[in-house]
Image (cartoon, helix red, strand yellow):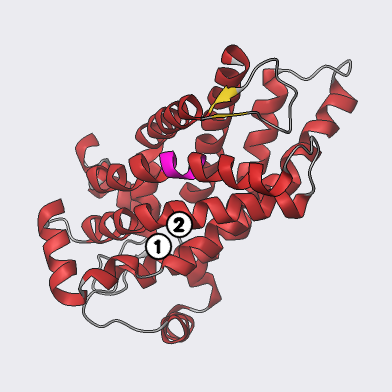
């Protein structure tokens, strides 16, 4: 089915299957390049908690990780999340946005956020399991992907693969809110003050980097809390009890563990995905 993009005037319809395919490819490329940052982030978030190793700082973690292969631990679980998740997200977003906005060319922030958050909520039905398996494999280096699936299923059943689903939705919705509200503002600021009124790929890159950093700083506590919650296999707690335990043991700053690699990954990943995806759209439509 062909869906015409509403926010930009294209000369011909945009095949949604091409958007989904290339969107998945760009997301995969971004994840492969940035995955070592994801590994470091999870290790720091779980630092010294729930029986995980304790590191004095990021330098001690890097010193212990002696091979590149270690940095790609559990990437198979991440692929189990990204491949169905990224494809489903784009299909869902295109259909939802078309249903909500109709023929409107310029839509509001609320409508954009509603479309994005709804699409991510649908996509996470396929991606949440991969997120859980990735976190548990990183923190249990002796387990393979199959063993992690078996352990999780034996302990919590099928419902356990959806643990933290709503927390995942809230985190991604918060990131989208920041990105939607800030990207165009950064873009307009740079175009107005540093160019002749012409937008360029350099402006898009810089705007994406700043937006990613802003989103990372604001949502790092949610992501850190999500990792703690999803890693629980045996002694599972509610959201509230997990939060109270974290605050008692580590204080509010415990929520900011792993913020640096999280912000770097988010800014680089979103920039790479956005620039490649937008350039692809301009070439085919």
Question: Where does residue 49 sit, x and y in percent of width and height?
Answer: 32, 73
The vertical placement of 117 against 247, above or below, is above
The residue closer to the viewer here, 3 or 61, is 3
Are the residues flagged by discs 1 and 2 in contact, CB closer than 8 Å?
yes
Residue displayed at 50% across by 69% down:
255
Q: Quadrant of residue 143?
A: bottom left
Which numbered disc covers residue 105?
A: none
Q: CA distance from mark 1 to mark 2?
A: 5 Å
Is residue 89 on the magenta stretch?
Answer: yes
Helix, strand or loop at mark 1: helix
- For residue 101, side relative to residue 273 (left or right): right
- For residue 102, side relative to residue 285 (left or right): right
Count numbered badges in the picture: 2
Dominant secondary structure of the magenta stretch?
helix
Residue displayed at 65% across by 17% down:
12
Tell me which label, 1 or 2, sits earlier in the chain: 1
Q: Which residue is mark 1?
A: 45
Q: Please tell me how crowded label 2 is: few (under 14), some (14-19), or many (20+) other residues with Cα within 10 Å.
A: many
Residue furthest toward the top?
283
Which numbered disc covers residue 258?
A: 2
The C terminus - image quarter = top right
Q: Is residue 244 visible?
A: yes
The span picked out in magenta is: 86-90
Q: Is residue 67 visible?
A: no
The vertical placement of 252 against 267, above or below, is below
The vertical placement of 185 against 161, above or below, is above
Question: Where does residue 83 sit, x and y in percent of width and height?
Answer: 34, 39
Helix, strand or loop at mark 2: loop
Q: Please tell me how crowded label 1 is: few (under 14), some (14-19), or many (20+) other residues with Cα within 10 Å.
A: many
Question: Where does residue 227 sit, x and y in percent of width and height?
Answer: 39, 64
Residue displayed at 65% across by 28% down:
4
């Amino acid at each position: 089915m062909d869906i015409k993009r509403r926010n930009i005037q294209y000369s011909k319809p945009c095949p949604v299957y091409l958007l989904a395919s290339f969107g998945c490819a760009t997301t995969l490329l971004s994840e492969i390049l940035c995955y070592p940052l994801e590994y470091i982030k999870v290790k720091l978030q779980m630092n010294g908690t729930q029986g995980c190793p304790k590191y004095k700082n990021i330098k001690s973690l890097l010193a212990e990780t002696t091979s590149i292969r270690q940095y790609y631990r559990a990437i198979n679980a991440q692929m189990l999340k990204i491949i169905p998740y990224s494809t489903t997200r784009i299909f869902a977003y295109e259909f939802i946005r078309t249903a909500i906005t109709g023929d409107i060319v310029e839509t509001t922030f609320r409508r954009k956020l509603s479309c994005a958050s709804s699409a991510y909520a649908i996509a996470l039905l396929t991606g949440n399991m991969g997120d859980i398996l990735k976190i548990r494999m990183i923190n249990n280096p002796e387990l393979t992907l199959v063993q992690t699936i078996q352990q999780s299923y034996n302990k919590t059943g099928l419902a356990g693969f959806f643990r933290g689903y709503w927390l995942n939705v809230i985190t991604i919705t918060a990131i989208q809110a920041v990105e939607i509200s800030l990207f165009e503002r950064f873009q307009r600021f740079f175009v107005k003050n540093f160019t002749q009124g012409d937008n360029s790929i350099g402006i898009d890159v810089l705007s994406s980097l700043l937006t990613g950093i802003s989103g990372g700083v604001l949502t790092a506590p949610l992501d850190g809390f999500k990792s703690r919650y999803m890693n629980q296999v045996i002694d599972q707690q509610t959201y509230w009890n997990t939060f109270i335990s974290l605050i008692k043991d580590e204080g509010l700053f415990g929520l900011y563990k792993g913020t640096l690699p999280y912000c770097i990954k988010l800014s680089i990943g979103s920039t790479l995905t956005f620039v490649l995806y937008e350039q692809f759209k301009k070439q085919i439509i």
